[in-house]
Amino acid sequence: MKRKFILFSHLLLMMAGLFVAGCVKMDVTPTNKFTDETYWQSEDKANSVLNMAYRQMFSSDYLLANEILSDNVYNGYGTTNEKVISNGLADASNGRFEGEWGNCYGGIKTCHTFLANVDRVTAMDPALREKRKAEIRFIRASLYLELTTWYGDIPHFTQDISLDESKSITRKPQAEVLAWIHQELDEVAAILPTREQYAAADNGRITNGAAVALNARAYLYENNWAKVAEYCEKLINSSTYGAYSLFPNYEQLFWVRNEYNSEIILSMQYVPDLRTWGNLVDYAPISANARLCLAGPTQGLVDTYLMKNGKKWTTADPDYADRDPRMNATIVYDGSKWTDRTGLQYTVVIHPDGTPTPGKPSDKYTGAGTAQTPTGYYYRKYADPSPAAYTGGSWDSNLNLPLIRFADVLLMYAEAKNELQQMNSSVWDLTIRKLRQRAGFDDTGEALNLPAGDQASWRELIRNERRTELALEGLRIFDIRRWKTAETVLTQAPRGAKFDKSSGSYDYIKLPAGNFSRNRDYLWAIPRKERLLNPGLTQNPGY
């Protein structure tokens, strides 16, 4: 069984749930034990608040839903908040706009509560207390980064505010918020230990390497290429912030038995029974006892995967054979092999004319709005075949979900060096070549070496590599927003597999185009109900 620092009693879990329910807005003052002067008398109680902040840092729901916001995945069953956003129909009352805002400020409130009270725990070792404060400060910085990335200018404060203050606070310019985030992450990186300095029981805690990596990501979202390169080099060229390397097996990188491997810089922590996530029940093949397919990978994502020889896939090539092995590790396509939790391997049949495996529910494409895939593809990434990864026979998984991987650091570095016009074979070999070698590309110069080209052609290759390496990890939407390509890729009609026979012969599934306004949709709406509480909050253009 996993041993992680987030293991705590059911009582504390219930208390955390009560606190979350009562503090998702800036205008709510908590009244439970976490702010009671008598509460802060032991290290265990302080840790329970810290653990709750970890839980509020991010969620599996948003990781999966962020893909629907991008061109990687199409939501075909029902209508999620993210689908409404993708269709350009969201207003300031959209549930995702409200939820993101409320969840982030709820987590920030937890952080402020901890920082305001932890010094009361006099029995706590002073050095340990400073480390725990640094962890909380990291979480707070990450929540502010999430907020300012989606909303631009935001209310920013570094201690808890009163009810009256919450009704009059104004938005701070994004540049000022980001400057604070960078300074905060620099400061906590100087306090936190490396991953190697933690005991096994502390696996999953925030490290100084995570602070450096998140700072690199924050600079990436600003297109500050010199700083991106500088911070990535701290992780690539030195072990001062921990020793990181690519895990040798891409598919098994996302399995429970390997979740504390050398590539993971930061991940969401889950444990059997106490904290699990179950989103794959609506993304995995129906034959694997999934409930339905809410959303499926698009043909556009599938087309992005190169051939193993390094060439672009063309319609003259086989649909799925001899492709970048990361495709099979990420996406279930017609003819894929699936291993169920008994160890039985069978073929997943998705083609409308195919014959499903006897005794298994059908995965066949049956058209729009049905329980099967809307695109002809299902998820494989995160679907650990081990029964130990789940609670009983359900899809409640205890797999940690990666938030930052060393692969991302390599990709950020390659992109930064190219944008600085410093791409060369040494940078390529340190980054893209390593990723392709790990993926299983052919051991040839054409597949692995820096091709002849220029900054523009290398930019396309690096962006393509980023899409395939990080597919279904919730990051694509942030990339196409910072590249300012969202207005193009999100307004093109997505396609599914070649399973549409409405014209008499099979063609690619045609799906409705989304809508994305360059003058509005690069920022989200400030939630309407927040502006009703605080008229001083201005609105972003177009809402």
Image (spheres, grey):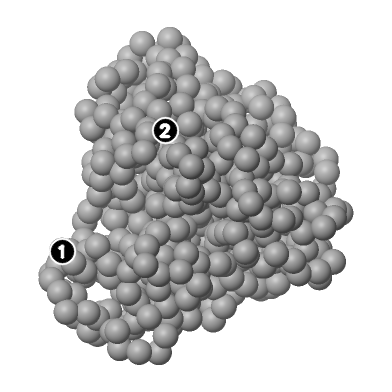
Q: The residue tagged with tag 2: helix, strand or loop?
A: loop
Q: The residue tagged with tag 1: helix, strand or loop?
A: helix
Residue 5: name its quadrant: bottom right
Residue under the point 45% across and 58% down: 302
Image position of 49 (left or right of 92)? right
Image position of 372 (left or right of 25)? right
Q: Which residue is mark 1?
A: 456
Identify which residue, 119 or 347, lies in the foreground. 347
Identify which residue, 93 or 514, lies in the foreground. 514
Q: Earlier in the sequence, mark 1 or mark 2?
A: 1
Q: Residues within 10 Å of mark 2 (few under 14, many from 20)?
A: few
Q: Quadrant of the N terminus?
A: bottom right
Q: Which mark is residue 512?
A: 2
Identify which residue, 207 or 421, lies in the foreground. 421
Amino acid at dot 1: Ala
Q: Above or below — where is 70 with respect to 341? A: above
Q: Quadrant of the C terminus?
A: top left
Residue 469, percent from left and from top: 44, 65
Q: Above or below — where is 203 with respect to 434? A: above
